[in-house]
């Protein structure tokens, strides 16, 4: 039995370690935010340079081939496209510092207003797709782990492999063919009615669910073999309580990490999915802006998607560091 001095020393060591963990959180936060800002600046710079270097002229798209050279030069000057690329880039960065995303070439409206009109549709699709992915992943992952090496396990993992293998641009039209044209259950495209989000959400959420379900299965199988799970069962707890309270809760840490990393893929997949279903969100706006060479809108859409991706990954890192303080100190295995 430990002496009183040993207990005091142990408590002091624990308190000191906890204080060290708490002090490390601000520095960890500053480090992550600094890295995120560098990534966003890199994305903004690369996108700006690429869209100005690729073939195609916004003036030709807006005026057509029959415009006179004088009209072309006048429009080019009014849009600021006659200036050197370096000057345009400096002006763009200055506008970003003022939170000014510029004016759309095509609609002559502030880009911020255009984004705010489309953002609710993308947010709705992302939230519903995420719910679909979580429900499918947790259900299939737990079923495969509990029924290991049975047909249930094989079927669940076969679904996962199928979901990863099928691209959105093929799955979307297939769902339209079956559930819209043949069965008539859901609209073919657009955002009219509550049922319009079902097929796009299934298209976008199935691939994420396939990846997450495999992680849930492997993580849960590892946790279910731990000693505290056997202790919980020996105490007479119900299998459901052991699985959900003691097993799943401890198996979610790597799942949360993977989920944060895959949310960026979810946003990227929204571009294809929104185009297939004519869903009026940021993804479809990006494609439309690329086709019309609307530089300010393209830059704003890519900036918004990259910011969302970086923010989600930043929050995932912070959640991981909060759950496991060793991450902040770099001492985790």
Image: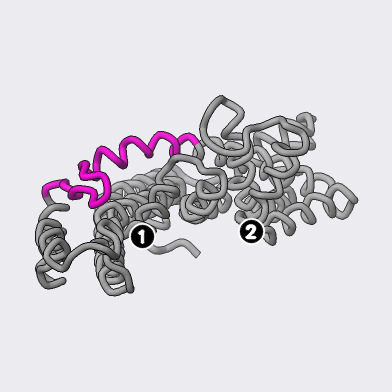
For mark 2, does the 10 Å Cα neighbourhood hold few (<14), some (14 to 19), or many (20 or more) residues?
Answer: some
What residue appears at the point 44 percent right and 49 percent down from the top-left corner?
Answer: 283
What residue appears at the point 65 percent right and 48 percent down from the top-left corner?
Answer: 206
User: Magenta residues, as a range?
Assistant: 98-124
Circle 1 or circle 2, nearest the eye: 2
Mark 2 secondary-structure assignment: loop
Q: Please state if 211 lies on the left or on the right of 268 as rendered.
A: right
Q: Please state if 276 lies on the left or on the right of 73 as rendered.
A: right
Choose between 325 and 299: the one closer to the eye.
299
Q: Which residue is labeled 2 in the image?
A: 167
Mark 1 secondary-structure assignment: helix
Image location (x, y in percent) of residue 285: 39, 48
What residue appears at the point 79 percent right and 34 percent down from the top-left corner?
Answer: 239
Between marks 1 and 2, how big is the CA–CA gap? 40 Å
What residue appears at the point 68 percent right and 58 percent down from the top-left corner?
Answer: 166
Q: Which mark is residue 144?
A: none
Image location (x, y in percent) of residue 100: 16, 47
For mark 1, does the 10 Å Cα neighbourhood hold few (<14), some (14 to 19), or many (20 or more) residues?
Answer: some
Q: Which residue is labeled 1 in the image?
A: 329
Q: Quadrant of residue 179?
A: top right
Q: Quadrant of residue 183?
A: top right
Whether residue 325 is visible, yes or no, is no
Pick whichever of labels 1 and 2 is earlier in the sequence: 2
Quadrant holding the N terminus: top right
């Amino acid at each position: 039995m430990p002496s009183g001095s040993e207990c005091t020393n142990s408590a002091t060591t624990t308190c000191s370690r906890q204080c060290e963990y708490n002090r490390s959180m601000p520095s960890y936060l500053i480090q992550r935010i600094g890295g995120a800002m560098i990534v966003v600046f890199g994305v903004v710079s690369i996108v700006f340079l690429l869209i100005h270097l690729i073939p195609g002229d916004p003036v030709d798209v807006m005026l057509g081939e029959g415009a006179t050279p004088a009209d072309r030069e006048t429009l080019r000057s009014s849009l600021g496209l006659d200036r050197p690329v370096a000057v345009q880039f400096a002006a763009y960065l200055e506008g970003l510092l003022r939170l000014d995303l510029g004016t759309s070439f095509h609609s002559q409206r502030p880009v911020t207003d255009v984004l705010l009109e489309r953002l609710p549709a993308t947010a709705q699709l992302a939230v519903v797709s995420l719910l679909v992915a979580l429900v499918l992943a947790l259900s299939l992952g737990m079923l495969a782990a509990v029924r290991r090496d049975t047909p249930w396990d094989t079927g669940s993992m076969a679904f996962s492999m199928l979901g990863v293998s099928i691209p959105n641009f093929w799955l979307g039209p297939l769902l339209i063919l079956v559930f819209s044209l043949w069965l008539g259950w859901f609209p073919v495209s657009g955002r009219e009615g509550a049922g319009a989000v079902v097929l796009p959400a299934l298209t976008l959420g199935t691939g994420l669910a396939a990846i997450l379900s495999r992680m849930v299965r492997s993580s849960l199988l590892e946790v279910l073999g731990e000693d505290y799970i056997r202790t919980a069962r020996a105490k007479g707890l119900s299998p459901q309580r052991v699985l959900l309270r003691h097993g799943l809760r401890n198996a979610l840490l790597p799942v949360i990490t993977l989920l944060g990393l895959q949310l960026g893929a979810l946003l990227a997949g929204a571009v294809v999915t929104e185009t297939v279903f004519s869903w009026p969100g940021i993804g479809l706006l990006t494609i439309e802006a690329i086709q019309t060479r609307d530089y300010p809108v393209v830059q704003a859409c890519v900036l918004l998607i990259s910011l969302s991706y970086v923010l989600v990954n930043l929050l995932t890192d912070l959640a991981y560091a909060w759950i496991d303080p060793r991450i902040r100190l770099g001492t985790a295995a």
